[in-house]
Every structure is written in C-alpha cells, then in structure tokens.
Amino acid sequence: MTFRSEGPRNLGPRPCETDLQSVFRVMRVDPIAAESADLLYERAFQSHWDDVFRFSLAWTNDWAASEDMAQDTFLRLWGTRHRLDWGQPVLPWLLVTARRLATDRFRSLRRRLLAADSATIGLNESVRAHWLDVRAAMDVLSPLERTALVMTAIEGIPYDEAAQTLGTSAGALRAAVSRARQKLEAA
C-alpha cells in the first residue's frame, strides 16, 4: 500500500509539531523572523507609545480617545509586523496611521453630530459656541496644514523629520505651517 502526499494542501498538524510551529508553517512565516518581528514590535511600542499618544491627543484633545487611537495604531502595527520593513524608521508609519485614524474618527463624529439634535447634546451654550469656533477654525485648514501644524508646533518634531513623514519637502512644510498659523490668527 502506498500513500500519496497531498503536498501544500495538507495543512493539518504534523507529528511532533507544536501549535505555534503549525501556525508558522501554514502562514509561511519563518519562526526566527516572527520572533524577531515580535521583539522589534515591543521595542517600537516602548520607544514610541508616548509620541503616538501625544500626537493623538493633539488631534483629539480628548485623553480617552487619544489612548484608544494610540492603541488602535499599535494594534495595526501588530497586524503588519511580519510584513513591515523594520530597517526603516517606524515612527513615520505610526504617525501616519494615527492621523488616518483621527481623520476616520472625525468623520464618524461629524456624521453623529449631524444626525443628533442640538438639544440632545447637553452642552451649555458657551462651551458649544467655543467648540464650534475651534471646529470652524480647524476646518479652514487643509489636512496638510493641520497635520504640519500639529507635528511641528505641538509635537515638536523637527521640520525635516516631519516633512519626511508626510512625504514633502521641509520648505513646503514650513509654508504649510505658516499658512495654517495665518488662517488660525485670522479666524
């Protein structure tokens, strides 16, 4: 009696194979590279959590929402840790991801606010008026101007590093920050 191998279709456990080894084999991930990616993720988490949290806080002005956004950012990093090029700096990737999460959050909040009646919000008029003024002033800024202003003025990231993160030149970033400041002063 001869047995025929099913080749790559046979994804069941092999004799004396641990569950983790089975997962690595099915995912076609090198266990040594996976362990290395996990260690690099831990280092990135330890060294950049505060930066991502502060960046999120600058965007949301809400402590709890900033923690959630930072956690979501690192959760996305965890999901891509095996595909990420760890030879490149990870902070730009984290900040861009956090900015995209903030944008998604603002869109969601905008939809909910438009759907809600102003009487059900429960804010007193002075707080509501101030919030609307800030929102209107920030709505005037383009996404590049808003991001450039947050990264350089609030986060304190140097213009060169922020420009590299945003994929633009330092001169264009300085111009965006200048325009953002002028627009906010005029508002």
Image: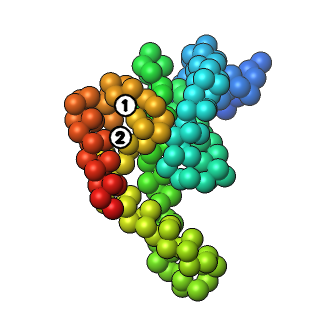
Marks 1 and 2: in contact by CB < 8 Å? yes
Q: Secondary structure at mark 2?
A: helix
Type of amino acid under label 1:
Ala
156 versus 89 height, above or below: below
165 versus 54 height, above or below: above
Q: Quadrant of the C terminus?
A: bottom left
Q: Position of residue 92 (x, y in %)?
A: 43, 30
Q: Position of residue 164 (x, y in %)?
A: 32, 27
Identify the residue at horizontal 61%, vertical 78% (top origin): 124
Tell me: 144 left or right of 106: left
Q: Residue furthest front?
A: 185
Identify the residue at horizontal 51%, vertical 46% (top origin): 58
Identify the residue at horizontal 67%, vertical 32% (top origin): 12
- Are there few (<14), some (14-19), or many (20+) residues within 10 Å of tag 2? many
Can you identify the residue that label 1 sits on?
162
Can you identify the residue that label 2 sits on?
148
Instruction: Tell me the quarter of the picture where residue 39 sits.
Output: top right
Q: Position of residue 157 (x, y in %)?
A: 43, 29
Q: Quadrant of the N terminus?
A: top right
- Are there few (<14), some (14-19), or many (20+) residues within 10 Å of tag 1? many
Labels 2 and 1: the sequence-earlier one: 2
Type of amino acid under label 2:
Ala
Scheme by which the image is coloured:
rainbow
Q: Is residue 89 visible to us here?
A: yes
Foreground residue, 171 or 86? 171
Q: Which mark, residue 150?
A: none
Q: Position of residue 3 (x, y in %)?
A: 63, 24
Tell me: 115 left or right of 166: right
Tell me: 116 left or right of 144: right
